[in-house]
Amino acid sequence: MDQRRPLIAGNWKMYKTQSEATETAKQLIRYVGAVTDIDMMIAPTFIALTAVFAAIKNSPVALGAQNLYWEDEGAYTGEISAPMLKSAGCQYCIIGHSERRQYFGETDETVNKKIKAAIKAGLQPVFCVGETEKEREAGQTLSILDKQIKKGLEGLVSEQLDPLIIAYEPVWAIGTGKTATDDQAQEVHRFIRSLVKNNFGQALSDSIRILYGGSVKPDNIASLMAMPDIDGALVGGASLSAESFSQIIKFKR
Ligand code: PEP
C-alpha cells in the first residue's frame, strides 16, 4: 500500500570493529545521503553504536541495535537496556533474531518482554519471526508464525503498536544464499498481515511494515519489493559492504 514507507535495514551482526563500522557508515552516507523516498537503518554492534551515531546523525540513515534487555537498569552483568540504547542514538532495535533464538536461548516469552521494553523506551522494535527448514518441510510454517506473533505481542494492544515493524526471516534463508521465492515470501507476508488484522484490527494491518529477510542481495531486492505485502528488507551479509547495501537501497522503483 502506498501509505507504507519502505524500510531497508542492515544487521551487521558481530562484524566490524568500531573504526571499521564508522568507516562503512561514512561510506554508506556518501552513497545514500541524498535518498529521501525510503527509510534506512544500520545496526552495528553495541560497542560501535556511539561512534556510528556520530557519523550518521545528520543523515537520513538511522541507527538500530541488535538486541536489548528488558529491565531499565539493575544488576544484570553484560546487558544493555532500552533507555540506554535510546540515549546512544538508536531509533530501532532488532528483537528475536533467529540467531538469538538459536544460540542464546531467546524464547517467545523473552521476545515479548523485549518488545514491551523497546516500545516503552520509544524504540521501534524490528520483531523477527520465521520458520526453520524442518518446520517448513513439515507444513508448519503458518502455525509457527501464528504462535511466534501471538506470543511475541501478548499483552499489547493496537494503540501501542504503531512503532512496531515485523521482519519475516525464514531461518533456512538466513546467510545461506537460499532466498524464499517472491511468491513464497508474499504468501507469508499476506498471512502475517491477516494475523495482525485479526488480532489488532484493520488500521494496524494496513499500516504495519513487514520486512523480508534472508539472503537479500542487489539482484533480488527489486522483485521482492514488487510484492504487495513486502515493505522492505532486513539484510545481513549484503549490508556489510556500503556498496552492495547502497545498491539494495537504490533498487529500481
Ligand atoms: C539477517 O541477519 O537478518 C539476514 C537476513 O542475514 P542474510 O541477509 O545474510 O541472510
Image (cartoon, rainbow, N blue to C red):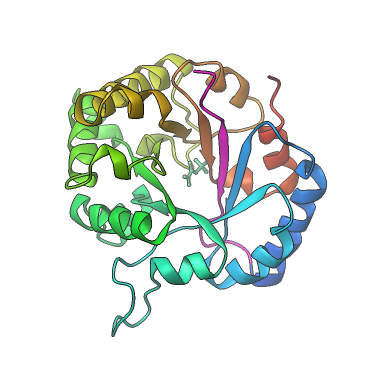
Q: Is residue 124 left or right of residue 76?
A: right
- Residue at image location 36% in from the left, 45% down from the top: 127
The one nearer the camera, 104 or 4, is 4
**Image quadrant assignment for residue 144:** top left
Q: Residue 4 location in percent, x, y? A: 51, 27
Please tell me how many numbered marks the rendered image carries.
0
**Could you say which is closer to the camera, residue 31 or residue 59?**
59
Image-based side of 174 in relation to 194, left or right: right
**Rendered image quadrant of residue 57:** bottom right
Residue 3 % position (x, y): 52, 23
Please provide percent x and percent y for residue 114: 30, 58
Which residue is depicted at the point 61% across and 33% down? 217
The answer to whether residue 167 is seen in the rendering is yes
Quarter holding the C terminus? top right
In the image, which residues are magenta? 1-16
Q: Position of residue 125 (x, y in %)?
A: 40, 49
Residue 30 left/right relative to 21: right
40 sits to left or right of 69:
right
Q: Nearer the viewer, residue 106 or 250?
A: 250
From what the image shows, is residue 75 above or below residue 23?
below
At 19% from the left and 38% from the top, the residue drawn is 150
The relative height of residue 28 versus residue 181 in the rendered view (above or below) is: below
Q: Residue at x 48, y 28 (%)?
A: 179
